[in-house]
Amino acid sequence: MQLKYNRQQSIGSSIGRVLIKLALILIILIVGMFLIEKINFPSPKQDYKIDITDEIKKLK
């Protein structure tokens, strides 16, 4: 008597694999965000103050 080979995966094992993949992707994204925060991007040195009161008066 020959044993039957079960080619179909059970629902529990397929859900487990999906959860593991999602957890790994989430961990990679979180680590990536922390690494991006550590990079010092250039920012403007002075604040720009533009007076637009004249344009507002012209619109009224």
Image (cartoon, grey):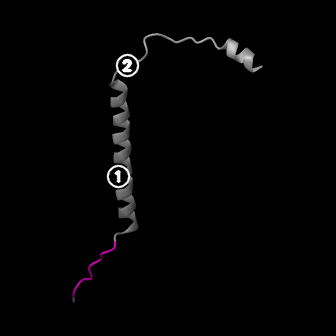
Residue 1 higher or lower than 48, as above or below: below
Between the C-alphas of marks 2 and 1, the distance is: 37 Å
Q: Quadrant of the N terminus?
A: bottom left
Nearer the observer, 6 or 44: 44
**Residue 3 covered by magenta stretch:** yes
Three-letter code, disc 1: Ile
Q: Position of residue 35 (x, y in %)?
A: 33, 30
Q: Is residue 6 left or right of residue 19?
A: left
**Farthest residue in the bottom direction?**
1
Three-letter code, disc 2: Pro
**Farthest residue in the left direction?**
1
Q: Is residue 59 left or right of residue 10?
A: right
**Residue 36 covered by magenta stretch:** no
Q: Position of residue 59 (x, y in %)?
A: 74, 20
Disc 2: which residue: 42
**Residues packed near mark 2 inside 10 Å, few (<14), some (14 to 19) or many (20 plus):** few
The segment highlighted magenta reads 2-8
Disc 1: which residue: 20
Q: Give SS at disc 2.
A: loop
Q: Residue at x 37, y 19 (%)?
A: 42
Based on the displayed image, in which of its 4 quarters is residue 27 positioned?
A: top left
